[in-house]
Amino acid sequence: MQKNWWFVSFLFIFCLFGRSTGLFADQSEAPLISPEQIASLHDVVFGQGGGRDLHAEIAYPNGAKAPLPAIIYIHGGGWVGGSQHDSYLPVAKIAQHGYFVASIEYRLSKEAKWPAQIEDCKLAVRWLRANATKYNVNPNRIGAWGDSAGGHLVACLGTMADQKQYEGAGGYPDVSSAVQAVVDFYGPTDFTRPDIYSPQAAWLTQGLFGMPYDKDPEVWKSGSPLYFVKPDDPPMLLVHGDADVLVPLAQSTVFDEALTKAGVPHQLLIVKNAGHVFGPKPGTAIDPSREEIEKAVFAFLAKHLQAP
C-alpha cells in the first residue's frame, strides 16, 4: 500500500482537519543539518527473518556528540511489495532533522504470512537498542514511522510491545522492542469490520493472513492493533485522508477513539479531499501542503523524542 505501480489507480488528493489543537502550533526547531553532514550506510544487516538476512538503509548526522534519537521507518506496499528503499521521505532528509534513521526490510506476504512482518519490525527495534552505543543512539528515544502497510506495522509496534508471541527468534531476545513514539500514515488498524475496510484492500489482507476472514476471524483480529490498545502505549500521530478508498478514514477514527478511551496521548490529522498516499484530486490544491504535514510530523517527533 504505498506509491507502487499497482496502486496508482487509487491515488486521491487530500486536505487537513486537525482533531488536536496545536498540531501546527509554532514550535522552535533547530535548523536543518546540512546534507554534507549526513552519513549513509547501505544494506546493513540487522538480523534474520525466516533464515535469511534482513537489511536496512541508514542515515544519520555525522559527528554528533550526544546520543541521537532514532526513527525506525517501515515502508508500505500492501505487505506484498516495496522495500527498505521506499520511505515516504528519503532517510537522509529525515536525518537532517537530527535523527538516526533506519528504513528496514521485512518479509513480505508472498514469502511469509503474519506474524512474520511484526516479528521483523520488532527485531529491528531490538537490534537498534542493543547496538545503541555502536551507532551513538539514545536507546530510550526510538520512534517508528510508517505509511500504509507500514502505518499498520508501526501501529502494531506501538500497541504490541507486551505481546511476546510476536517477538520472533531473529536475535536480541532480552532486549525491549518498545518504541517511544509512533507516526502512522493511513494505516489499517482493524481488519475485523468489512464496513470500514475496502474491497480493494481485502485481497491484500487475505494475502497477509493466508486465508479469508470467514475461515479464521481470530487470525485477522490478531493483526489488528485496535484490539491491543492499552493506557501505557506511546504517543501516536495518525495522519489520514478523508477520501481514501483503499484504507478508509474510519480505520484511523476508530483507532483514535480507542486511544482516547485508553488515555493514550495522540493526535489525529484528517486531510480533507485526500486519497491514499496523499495524491491530489484533479483541479484542487492540498490543504495543508505536504510541507505543512511534514512540519506537523517533525514537531510531534521533536516533542516526544528530542525534548529534554
Image (cartoon, rainbow, N blue to C red):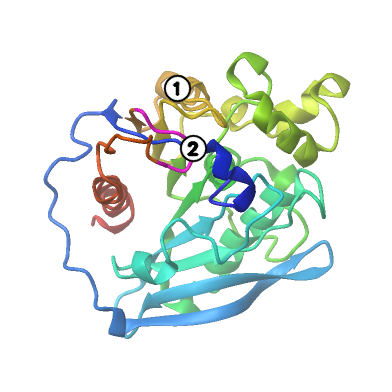
Q: Label 1: few (<14), some or many (≥20) within 10 Å?
A: some
Mark 2, residue position: 276
Could you tell me the amino acid type at mark 1? Answer: Thr
Residue 135 visible in rendering = yes
Judged from this view, the residue extending furthest toward the front is 283
Q: Residue at x 75, y 33 (%)?
A: 203
Q: Residue at x 44, y 26 (%)?
A: 243
Q: Residue at x 30, y 75 (%)?
A: 66
Mark 1, residue position: 253
Residue numbers of the magenta segment: 273-279
Q: Nearer the viewer, residue 254 or 289?
A: 289
Q: Is residue 135 above or below residue 112?
A: below
Seen in the image, is 302 located left or right of residue 25? right
Q: Earlier in the sequence, mark 2 or mark 1?
A: 1
Marks counted in the figure total 2
Q: Is residue 37 above or below residue 116?
A: below
Seen in the image, is 219 located left or right of residue 136? right
Could you tell me the amino acid type at mark 2? Answer: His
Judged from this view, the residue extending furthest toward the right is 215
Q: Position of residue 211 (x, y in %)?
A: 86, 32
Seen in the image, is 198 located left or right of residue 98? right
Question: Magenta stretch: residue 288 in it?
Answer: no
Q: Position of residue 164 (x, y in %)?
A: 70, 45
Q: Position of residue 284 (x, y in %)?
A: 29, 34
Q: Quadrant of the C terminus?
A: bottom left
Name the element at disc 2.
Answer: loop
In the image, which is nearer the foreground, mark 2 or mark 1?
Answer: 2
Residue 161 visible in rendering = no
Q: Nearer the viewer, residue 78 or 104?
A: 78
Q: Quadrant of residue 70?
A: bottom left
Name the element at disc 1.
Answer: helix
Q: Label 2: few (<14), some or many (≥20) within 10 Å?
A: many
